[in-house]
Image: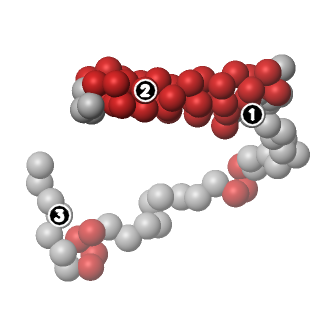
Amino acid sequence: MSTVRRATGWVLTIALVMLSLFNILTSGEIGYQSWIFLLLMPFSVALVLSSGDNKPAPVNISEEWKDEEKTDDDSAMKPGDFGFDTPVL
């Protein structure tokens, strides 16, 4: 499935480039239609770059949170302890 998605993306990308160039050459100017084709290219490139893997990333569950490892915020220094004014919103 991934190769079909990538092949489709490449075909769409090349087709959009060709349509844009054809439109520029036939009209003699860079009009809105050629910009539309160029602005649609990121969607076809996204098809090429997407991996297509539907498997979730492995998560390491072996590490558990222990009560001993909790940090106490009470021991933290407050802004007034350094001599700075505390901001009032």
The residue carrying mark 3 is 86
On the image, the x and y values in percent for residue 29 come to 24, 32
Which of the two labelled residues, at mark 2 and mark 1, occupies the earlier sequence position? 2
Which of the two labelled residues, at mark 1 and mark 3, occupies the earlier sequence position? 1
On the image, the x and y values in percent for residue 53 come to 80, 29
On the image, the x and y values in percent for residue 50 come to 68, 33
Secondary structure state at the residue bearing disc 2: helix
Q: Residues within 10 Å of mark 3 (few under 14, many from 20)?
A: few
The residue carrying mark 2 is 22
- Cα gap from disc 3 to disc 2, whole angstroms: 64 Å
Q: Which mark is residue 51?
A: 1
The structure residue drawn at horizontal position 32% and vertical position 20%, both measured from the top left corner, is: 33
Report the mark closest to the observer, 2 or 1: 2
Q: Is residue 36 visible?
A: yes
Q: Quadrant of residue 54?
A: top right
| Above or below: residue 64 compared with residue 31 | below
Q: Residues within 10 Å of mark 2 (few under 14, many from 20)?
A: few
- Cα gap from disc 1 to disc 3, whole angstroms: 49 Å
- The type of residue carrying mark 3 is Thr
